[in-house]
Structures are given as structure tokens and as C-alpha cells.
Amino acid sequence: MFFVCMISSFAGANVAFAQLPVKVPTAATGNIGNLFSQFTNSVKPESFTSQWAGSKGNFLSGLNKVKDAAGIGKNVATLAGFIKPDMFKSGFNVQNLIQTANTVKTMGAAANLLKTFEGGLKPTAFLSNWTQKRTGWLSALNLIK
């Protein structure tokens, strides 16, 4: 972060311009963790395996601590393992999702991974209010580069 000051002479008057420090947003990480939490909380409890109940709290609190794309990928792979196999659409390859999740390097790729994950689940895997949230959720993921 830096300050830039310029002094300019305009019509005989000295005018000073200052550029205030610009905070580089960390929104990509913060927002994607929040979006991942929204997604996870929109999956019906009965769409998860029985092991999910004991892991849900730690999983969700861990999303707030993710700092990079690899962390998002790791958590996608973990969450996919907690979803019952019959909640995925026919033909969706969960193992490919997990393999891809373990190689994610950019936040844009992590956002695309979440979209792929969401698209691979049957509509019946979600709570009824997901249909209203989904469009905004996808739009927010599209902003992550």
C-alpha cells in the first residue's frame, strides 16, 4: 500500500491531490469460503452419509480459515466424500471431481470446481430454498478470477 501526492499548479493555484491507500481485497478467498458454506448448508441433511453429522461443525468452521485455492479444492474433495452416491446425477464422475479438486491452483479454478460440484448433484439433494439462492450464488462465483 502506498500514498501518492501530486502538487499541481492550475490557474496560479497550487492544488494537492492525494491517493489514499487502497486495500487490495481478499474477497476471493473470503467470499469463496462463504459461498462454499452457503452451498454446504443448502444440501439436505439426508443427502449426506451418516459420518457427516460428526464432521459438519469442524468442516464449516474450517472453511473460514481457507486461504488459498488448494484449500478450497481439498475441502471440495472432503465434502464430496460425505455426499451419498445416489445424490449425484447419473453419469457424474465423483472420482474425477475429487482428482480435479486435488490439483486446483487458482481461485478461478476453485470457483469453477464448486460450480461443477453443484451441477453434479441432483436437484433433490438440495433444500427447497436453493433454487432461489442458486442464481445469485453462481453469479458471485463467476466474479472470482
Image (cartoon, rainbow, N blue to C red):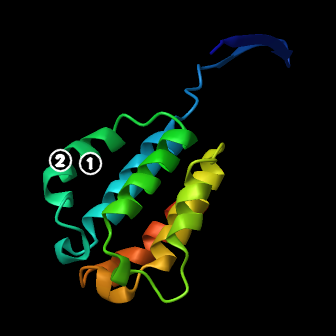
* Marker disc for residue 44: none
Image-quadrant location for residue 17: top right
Secondary element type, mark 2: helix
Residue under the point 39% across and 56% down = 36
Image-quadrant location for residue 24: top right
Pinpoint residue 70: horizontal percent, then vertical percent: 55, 41
Image-quadrant location for residue 4: top right
Residue under the point 24% across and 69% down = 48
* Marker disc for residue 57: 2
Q: Is residue 48 above or below residue 18?
A: below
Residue under the point 22% across and 42% down = 58
Report crowding for label 1: few under 14, some 14 to 19, many 20 or more residues within 10 A (C-alpha). some
Q: In this orientation, which residue lies closer to the viewer: 133 or 123?
A: 123
| Residue 90 shown left or right of residue 10 in the figure | left
Is the residue under label 1 in contact with that under label 2 (CB below 8 Å)? yes
Residue type indicated by callout 2:
Gly
Residue type indicated by callout 1:
Leu
Q: Which residue is mark 1?
A: 60
Pinpoint residue 144: horizontal percent, then vertical percent: 59, 53
| Residue 78 shown left or right of residue 129 in the figure | right
Residue under the point 20% across and 50% down = 55
Can see residue 144?
Answer: no
Question: How far apart in space, not on screen, are marks 2 and 1 (Cα)?
Answer: 5 Å
